Amino acid sequence: MHAPLWVFGYGSLIWDPGFPVAERRIARLDGWHRSFCMRSIHHRGTVDHPGLVLALDRAEGATCTGVAFRVTPGEEAATLNALRERELVSSAYLEMTLPVATDTGPVDALAYVIDPDHVQYCRLDCEEQARIIASATGGRGLNRDYLWSTAAHLADLGIGDPDLEWLATRVRDLI
């Protein structure tokens, strides 16, 4: 018998995993934080007008709370293929297996983290992030819908993220 496949969701995977889920657990990943640090030229923006999407960005002392998903047994290969097609559309994300803490114990989970050396990596202040998110659109829809869905689902799960909450409010103000 092989070990179960766990996937760590911190952005759109929380509300749209796109694979069969056997179990969900609130999970914490230390040493990383959720950040709008990836320019999106496919899903939430275009090459001519990039949007922003969330990525896990490594940071000393940081922590990111999200959801660990256990993939339905027998669906591991199909799930990996679907995730790679979705998340590795450019080489900006790196696929890593990282330890996450859950209330019922630690699990090793597949996670997609930003490559800080990639051209799509960026560090922008919150106001600039809000302006970009308010106006960008890509193949999977409006950038602002991505932000609002993620912020709403985090709130529903009791996971506070002050930066996302501020951005959600600021983007509403801008439009």
Image: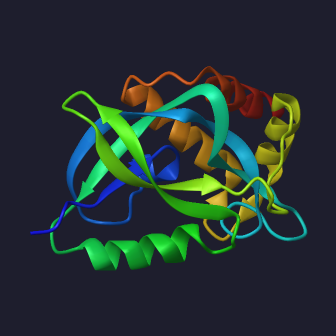
Residue 50 in sight here = yes
**Horizontal and vertical percent for residue 121?**
79, 54
Q: Quadrant of the N terminus?
A: bottom left
Relative to 66, 2 lies left or right = left
**Horizontal and vertical percent for residue 145?**
61, 48
Q: Quadrant of the C terminus?
A: top right
**Horizontal and vertical percent for residue 58?**
65, 40
Q: Nearer the viewer, residue 76 or 50?
A: 76
The answer to whether residue 156 is above or below residue 50 is: above
Residue 175 in sight here = no
Relative to 39, 22 lies left or right = left
The answer to whether residue 3 is above or below residue 29 is: below
Q: Residue at x 81, y 30 (%)?
A: 126
Q: How many marks?
A: 0
**Horizontal and vertical percent for residue 119?**
85, 63
Chosen colour scheme: rainbow
Q: Residue at x 29, y 44 (%)?
A: 107
Relative to 11, 98 lies left or right = left
**Residue reaching furthest left?**
1
Q: Nearer the viewer, residue 50 or 63?
A: 63
Q: Residue at x 76, y 27 (%)?
A: 170
Q: Residue at x 56, y 24 (%)?
A: 161
